[in-house]
Amino acid sequence: MKKILLISLLVLSCNTNKTAQPIDCIENIEYTEFSNENQPTVILDIKINDLSTIKKLENKKLREFIIYSIKKEDRNYFFYEVWKTPIRKENTFSFIIRTNYFSQNISDKEKRIWNKDNITKALSGDVGLIFDKDTIHVKPSKDREITIQLLND
């Protein structure tokens, strides 16, 4: 009798209809070089479903923004103004990151070192949203779009 009671208790307590935690993902990446004096930018559109993360972003609690596919020693070439609230459209937040990392084009036999394919590869990884004591690791969505706009293309 105890075995039947124990088994029925286990079956009832292991409810498989639990709702999964919504996943945050990168929906769009855009890199743009400008012809004027403006610094090139990377715009990352991240869909965020977690209400506590949304609240942290709205309250300007973001301390750092990391693009994990960029080497650790090169991440200081990417500047995100953490004191600004990201642009929000529904649950998608747009993070504007200024960088001169890809404009360091030293020509190698008349060939650009940072071409569209290399920039796409460099920006294709995961990102981290770092708050005070919390890091949100965000992966690209399967149907993510990447747009690269170079001056001399």
Image: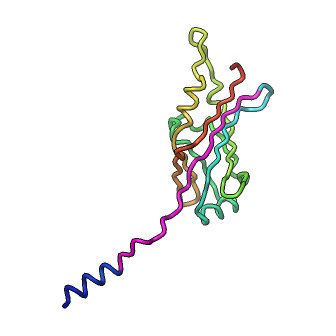
**Percent position of residue 82, x then y:** 68, 51
Name the residue rendered at 52%, 45% in the picture.
Answer: 142
- Point out the image quarter for the N terminus: bottom left
**Percent position of residue 17, x then y:** 43, 72
Which residues are drawn in magenta? Answer: 13-34
**Percent position of residue 103, x then y:** 65, 25
Give the answer, above or below, for where 115 lies relative to 131: above
Name the residue rendered at 70%, 47% in the picture.
Answer: 81
Give the answer, above or below, for where 133 lies relative to 37: below
In the image, taking residue 92 as reference, residue 138 lies left or right, namely left
Q: How many marks?
A: 0
Name the residue rendered at 63%, 38% in the picture.
Answer: 78
Q: What colouring does the structure picture have?
A: rainbow
In the image, taking residue 77 as reference, residue 9 lies left or right, namely left
Q: Farthest residue toward the right?
A: 36
Q: Quadrant of residue 10?
A: bottom left
In the image, taking residue 2 as reference, residue 31 lies left or right, namely right
Q: Farthest residue toward the top?
A: 109
Residue 14 lies within the magenta run: yes
Name the residue rendered at 75%, 28% in the picture.
Answer: 34
Residue 116 lies within the magenta run: no
- Point out the image quarter for the C terminus: top right
Work out whether residue 137 or residue 153 is closer to the camera in this orientation and state it: 153
**Percent position of residue 152, x then y:** 70, 19
